[in-house]
Amino acid sequence: MSPTTLPAGPEHGHVTFLGAGPGDPGLLTLRAVEALANADVLVAEHEVLDVVRTHARAGVAVVHTDPDPSSNPVPGTGTPQLTVVDGKSATVGVPVVRDAAHLVMEAARSGRRVVRAVTGDPGLDTDAAAEMLACAAAGVPFEVVPGIASAVGVPAYAGVPLRDAEGTDVRFVDARTASGRCWTEVGASDGTVVVSTTLDAVAAAAGELVSAGRKPDTPMTVTVAGTTTRQRTWSATLGTVAQTLKQAKVLPSPDGGRPVIAVVGERSAAAQRDQLSWFESKPLFGWKVLVPRTKEQAASLSDQLRSYGAVPHEVPTIAVEPPRTPQQMERAVKGLVTGRYEWIAFTSVNAVKAVREKFEEYGLDARAFAGIKVAAVGEQTARALIAFGVKPDLVPSGEQSAAGLLEDWPPYDPVFDPIDRV
């Protein structure tokens, strides 16, 4: 039995160190989704929450780490529920690793299934490695679910393959911890260099590579917010990157500390990015689109918008409610059962849902439609009827509206009374 499927109990506490990838929730592995769906406690930083929360089970609560223990009780007590714990401390100078490791182990010792989610891959996260050692020292069982490393996933979304047909050598550098020796080694190579840094430190990293021997005209790409709909990529060279970012008006900026992935190399396909940029070239990439549908119906449209690169904002401006006079629906259902109608027209999925719920209330099913012709406005309404067990006799061939329905209405059938329309 998998550790994440064990029942909660003091003897079954367990920690899953999970790689959340570079930012796109769709890049989570199947194993990660399974662990999130079964977790009792989720420990994650702010930037990871939006990624993992998509697949976490209902009832998620966000609890921020606070220096005052009375304001945030240790997770793992009270009614079992999925709790999101922010692993970052609010106190300057207090090590995050110590606080997060304490929360992880306390939750696990109380018998909870704990998921510790980190950006990218846990194997490349120094905090996660320290927390694993802390769990091992404390005898807390744990497992690791790998994730897509940002240094690999972000270039793929930016349209910058890291290797060519000749098998280009690829080096990875974290500019925040790189030493002079590290820069010298990658500078002496003619392969591709993937640099993890921040927006305001990109020019300094480029300078280090030039100082180490790389030519100033070496192609370079810089990507911020990679794999998300906020992604933006600039193409430059080691010698021009500072000017490119300045002209783009992204520096100087209060957001200069944002993480970025820079790719440097003659054969990294950076020069061919115009042909390979598949993500940022989507037709609605970066557009903010308001979705005013009901909460229940917004998901499918939002998913479709995301597939085109848009950023959907769900703001329900309408609501579906039962009729103010229930007798009208009851009279319509009674007339349907007694054969009063020859036609019944459904103009929306909501109408199908309302009738279906009323049928279930009365103990009826699709057989009540026997002998009655059914019309549906729109393919989605038709599919909802088919799922109900009713195949529509008429769907408009042109405009999907009541007007379009009337245009296709058979001339030899009596026109239905609007009051009998659902």
Image (cartoon, grey):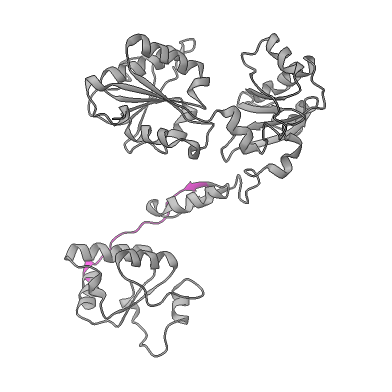
Q: How many marks?
A: 0
Please tell me in which quadrant of the rendered image residue 371 appears: bottom left
Residue 421 showing in the rendered view: yes
- Magenta-colored stretch includes residue 325: yes
Please indicate whether residue 222 sits to the left or right of residue 25 in the image: right
Residue at figure coordinates x 17%, y 66% from the top left: 362
Q: Position of residue 53 (x, y in %)?
A: 41, 35
Q: Of residues 380 and 341, which is closer to you in this image?
A: 380
Mainly helix, strand or loop, the magenta region? loop
Please determine whether, in this image, residue 334 is positioned above or below residue 78: below
Taking the magenta stretch, the answer to whether it contains residue 205 is no
Q: Nearer the viewer, residue 249 or 102?
A: 102
- Please state the horizontal and vertical placement of residue 285, each as a whole percent of the image: 61, 46
The magenta-colored residue range is 312-327
| Depth order, front residue of 154/400 | 154
- Could one spot residue 74 in this view of the protein? no
Res. 220 image quadrant = top right
**Residue 117: % across, % down:** 43, 26
